[in-house]
Image (cartoon, rainbow, N blue to C red):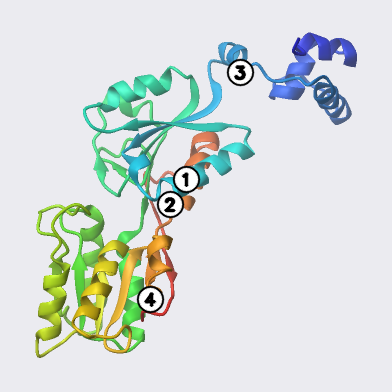
Amino acid sequence: MAASLSDIAERAGVSIKTVSGALHGGTARMSEETRARIKEIAEELGYVTNLAARGVRQGWLPLIGVVADELITSPFATEIIRGLDGAARTAEMAVFAMNLSGNRDVGSVLEEVRRFRPRAIAYAAMYHKTVELPPELSKSVGVMINCREASGRVISLVPDEEAAAIEVTRHLLAAGRKRIAFINLPGLLAGELREQGFRTVLNDAGLSPLAVLPAVRRPTYSDRAPSLVLAHVTALMAAADRPDAILCGNDRVAMEVYAALRRVGAAIPDDVAVASFDNQVEIASRLDPPLTTMALPHRAMGRLAAEILLTGPSSPARLLKLPFQLMERSSV
C-alpha cells in the first residue's frame, strides 16, 4: 500500500500537520532539520502526494491550465509550452492545455479547464491578435499569451512587432541596402505593426519603401491562401529600379522569395538581400544561404506567463511587449 502522511508522521515522531507543512508548504512551524528529516522519510517510504485529496483541501491542484486558441496547430506551440512548463516545474506545478478551435466557444473550453481545479489559467493564441473575452470569463484568465485582451482587463504578453521591424530594417540599411521592398502579411495585426516599424526607419533615413506588397491574394494572410510572391518578385526584378533587399512577412514567405529569385537568376545576397520574421528554424537555418530573421519571443512569453500566474505581475502594465532577437545569417 502507498505510504500516507500518518505513516511518515509516526516514523518521524511529529504531527500529521507538521508532515503536511514540510511536504506541501503548509503553515506548520519547524526547523530546517525537521523538514529535511521528514522529506527523507517520505522518500524512503515512497510517498506520493495525493493530488486529488490535496485539491479538495486547498481548492486547487498544482496545475496551470491553458486555453489553446489553435495554438496546438502552430509550429511555435512547443516554444510557448516549453517556457511555461519549465517555469511551472520550478514551482512544482504541471501544465495542461485544452484546444479552442472549430465550433468550440471559449466559455465551454474554459469550463473544461476549470473542472481540473488548476491553480491558474492562461489563454494562448496561435498568432498575435486581439481577443475579446466576455467580462465574466476574463475573471478566470490570469494572463494572455501571444495575444491581447481587447478590454485591457487581463495582462497580455505580446511580441514587440514594431520594434522588431525597426531592428531588422536598420540591419538592412547598415548592410548598405537602400531599395527595400516588403512582402507583408495582409489582414494581420503583426503585419500592420511590422509595416509601421519598417516605414518609420526608412522615413527617418530619408528613404521610401520600394514597394509594400501582400504575400497572398486574400484579404487576410494564411499559408493556404493563393500566393502572390512569385508574381511580385518577378515584377520587382524586371523593373528598372530593382530592389537590393526584400523584407518578408515571415519565413514561409522568405522561402518563396528564395525560389522566385533563383527563378529569375538573382543571387542572395549578392544581388538581393533577404530578411524575415519568426525564425522557424527548420526553414531559416536550412535555406541556402541561411536566412537572417527576427526570432519571436515565444519561450520568454511562456516563462513570464508562469511567473505572473504564480507570483503576480512585477508592474501594473496590462500590455507587455517582449523583444524579438535578430538571428544574423548569410542572406544579408
Q: In this image, 324 relative to 52: left or right?
A: left
Residue at 69%, 23% in the rendered image: 24
Asked if the residue under mark 2 is in contact with the one under mark 4, i.e. CB atoms within 8 Å, the reply is no
Give the labeled residue for mark 3. 51
What residue do we see at 34% from left, 73% from top? 168
Q: Earlier in the sequence, mark 3 or mark 2?
A: 3
How far apart are the alpha carbons under marks 4 and 1? 31 Å
Mark toward the start of the polypeptide (1 vs 3): 3
Viewer-nearest residue: 260 or 180: 260
Would residue 125 be visible to someone looking at this image? no
Answer with mark 3 or mark 4, whichever residue precedes in sequence. Answer: 3
| Badge 1 amino acid | Gly
Q: Nearer the viewer, residue 312 or 36?
A: 36
State yes or no: discs 4 and 1 in contact (Cβ < 8 Å): no
Q: Amino acid at mark 3?
A: Leu
The residue beneath circle 4 is 288
Residue that mark 2 sits on: 298
Amino acid type at circle 2 is His
Front residue of 144/237: it is 237
Q: Mark 1 and mark 2 in contact? Answer it, CB < 8 Å.
A: yes
Q: With 92 as the anchor, is 133 left or right in this view?
A: left
Q: CA distance from mark 1 to mark 2?
A: 6 Å
User: Horizontal placement of 176 versus 77: left or right?
Assistant: left
- Reading the image, the residue beneath label 1 is 302
